[in-house]
Amino acid sequence: MKRICLVCMGNICRSPMAEVVLRRTLEKHGLDVEVDSAGTGGWHVGDPMDERALATLTEGGYDGSAHRARRFDPSWFAERDLILVMDAENLRAVRRIAPPEADVRLFRSFDPGSPAGAEVPDPYYGGRSGFADVLRMVEAASEGLARHLADH
């Protein structure tokens, strides 16, 4: 079974939204893949998902209520086949601690409709519309990743 970890800064907005969406998308496609998420920072460890992120997921028909924030642990490289990060800053942070064989990429690289290097922007300091934008981005990237995994 493949294992994928989604990573953002604090693991309360983008990566948990992506985890919930990707898990459902992979199930819909009949793919047996384990999905989890984490943050590069540890200040939210144990906290639930940001209320705006949770509300956006709920409105989209997803359930993110069980989420609790975690910090990415370097030992996970040995246990994960793919590490998908939300933005260039976190990509650099994860690659700094990654072994050479680790597969670390931007999540939106799997969305065929997004330009090279596209990021999932952090909605934390903005309004609700930013969370809706994030949901659309992670849904598109999740579908692209599911198609990629089904083909490979």
Image (cartoon, rainbow, N blue to C red):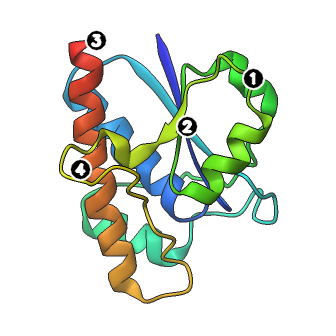
The disc label shown at residue 152, or none: 3
Closer to the observer: label 4 or label 2?
A: 4
Residue located 75% across and 57% down the image = 46
Q: CA distance from mark 3 to mark 4?
A: 19 Å
Q: Is residue 16 left or right of residue 32?
A: right
- Closer to the camera in the image, 119 or 59: 119
Determine the CA span between mark 1 and mark 3.
23 Å
In the rendered image, which quarter contains the C terminus? top left
* Spatial CA span between label 1 and label 2: 20 Å
The percent position of residue 31, horizontal first and vertical second, equals: 29, 19
Res 65 seen here: no
CB atoms at circles 1 and 2 under 8 Å apart?
Answer: no
Name the residue that disc number 1 marks. 99
> Which sits earlier in the primary sequence, circle 1 or circle 4?
1
Q: Is residue 9 left or right of residue 2?
A: right
Report which residue position mark 4 lands on. Answer: 140
Query: How many marks are shown on the rendered structure?
Result: 4
Mark 1 to mark 4 CA distance (whole Å): 29 Å
- Which sits earlier in the primary sequence, circle 2 or circle 3? 2
